[in-house]
Image (cartoon, helix red, strand yellow):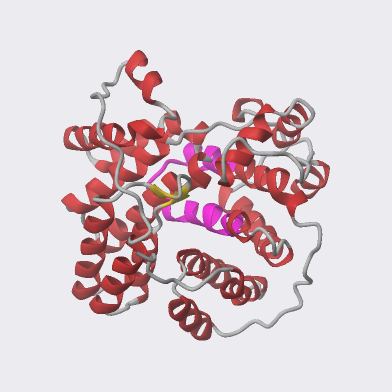
């Protein structure tokens, strides 16, 4: 990453940190993650700044601070999963990062937050991962990047959401394909209590005919070891699924972006936490199928073109949608690793599934 790209990214992060975590009440602020992709790609300072300015017109103002969170069971329990405490959570993690290195803070808080990694469709986890990629690329950290880690962990904590099933009960009783085939699905007519991925997941957990069967099936699978092989399998299935389930692109994008992001943490998290995170990402992966599969009864064939990486990046940047940018980044990461053309095919259809980026109308 050049100095100009880094300057543009840090400016984008600073601007994004002044805004809230969401817009429309549930859509995550993707500016930090997408700006990191653009900076990694090598876009000019002006282009990154323009993209950020346009995108942030959509994002809400931050929640006002309410009460200082301290590291005590009562204080943490009162704030966990409460988006209205998001500003308090950022302040809490800012303090944590003053007392210890960013690596030590991650090692301390990762096990505590991991059961709720599905929070806001994994966007707290993703925001942390993209920041770690910048830090490891640069080989150094600064105040803006530390504050960005606080935002990622803070969002994760504020939208903390557990799913049925527990890692402690996981056993290698079924292969992944058999478990996916047996998953109970929420019916298409089921009404979510709130919008987006969190709403469907909330309904998934609260539906008596679905939750126990879902928990049993996800606990019947341990992703392949080493953990990276399990991620290989998840992302390949996710790319095929994104092509097929054309009516619900946002949830299915994350079948590639979320597991692929775990690769960034290799060398940062120890092996046991990487294994545990891989399982929780499998749990999230299964919940996307269970929560959204019935909403897309008609499937596309994945017999589509596989353009070059250069063509895919050009198309993604011209399109500008944050999901297209992040998905293209993840797909090409996985393609570089595996050589499987399904990732290029999946990235090629993404622009047609999302609207191009435009400023929010006044």
Q: Can residue 87 be seen in this view?
A: yes
Is residue 264 on the magenta stretch?
yes
Secondary structure mostly seen in magenta is helix
Residue depicted at x 44% and y 30%? 81
- The image shows residue 307, relative to residue 266, as above or below, that is below
Residue extending farthest front: 362
Q: Is residue 36 visible?
A: no
Residue depicted at x 70% and y 59%? 237
**Residue stretch rendered in magenta on the structure:** 253-280
Left or right: residue 202 versus residue 12 is right
User: Residue 298 appears at what percent x and percent y?
Assistant: 81, 62
For residue 245, what is the image quadrant?
Answer: bottom right
Left or right: residue 163 versus residue 147 is right
Residue depicted at x 66% and y 30%? 205
Q: Quadrant of the C terminus?
A: bottom left
User: Residue 215 appears at what percent x and percent y?
Assistant: 71, 30
């Amino acid at each position: 990453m050049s100095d100009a790209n880094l300057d543009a990214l840090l400016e984008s992060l600073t601007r994004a940190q002044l805004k809230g975590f969401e817009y429309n009440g549930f859509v995550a602020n993707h500016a930090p993650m997408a700006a990191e992709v653009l900076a990694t790609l090598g876009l000019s300072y002006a282009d990154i700044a323009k993209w950020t300015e346009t995108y942030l017109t959509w994002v809400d103002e931050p929640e006002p601070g309410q009460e200082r969170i301290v590291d005590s069971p009562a204080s943490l329990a009162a704030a966990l999963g409460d988006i209205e405490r998001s500003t308090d959570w950022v302040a809490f993690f800012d303090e944590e990062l003053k007392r210890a290195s960013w690596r030590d803070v991650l090692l301390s808080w990762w096990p505590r937050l991991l059961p709720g990694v599905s929070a806001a469709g994994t966007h707290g986890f993703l925001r942390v991962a993209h920041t770690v990629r910048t830090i490891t690329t640069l080989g150094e950290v600064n105040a803006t990047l530390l504050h960005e880690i606080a935002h990622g962990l803070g969002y994760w904590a504020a939208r903390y959401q557990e799913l049925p099933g527990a890692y402690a009960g996981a056993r290698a009783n079924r292969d992944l394909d058999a478990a996916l085939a047996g998953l109970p699905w929420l019916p298409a007519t089921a009404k979510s209590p709130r919008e987006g991925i969190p709403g469907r997941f909330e309904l998934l957990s609260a539906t008596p005919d679905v939750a126990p069967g879902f928990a049993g099936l996800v606990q019947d699978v341990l992703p392949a070891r080493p953990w990276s092989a399990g991620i290989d399998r998840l992302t390949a299935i996710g790319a095929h699924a994104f092509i097929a389930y054309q009516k619900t692109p946002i949830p299915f994008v994350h079948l590639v972006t979320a597991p692929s992001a775990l690769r960034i943490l290799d060398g940062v998290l120890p092996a046991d936490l990487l294994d545990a995170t891989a399982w929780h990402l499998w749990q999230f992966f299964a919940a996307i199928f269970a929560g959204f599969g019935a909403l897309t009864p008609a499937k596309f064939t994945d017999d589509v073109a596989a353009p070059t990486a250069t063509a895919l990046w050009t198309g993604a940047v011209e399109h500008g949608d944050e999901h297209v940018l992040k998905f293209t980044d993840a797909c090409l990461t996985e393609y570089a690793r595996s050589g499987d053309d399904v990732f290029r095919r999946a990235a090629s259809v993404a622009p047609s599934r999302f609207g191009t980026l435009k400023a929010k109308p006044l």
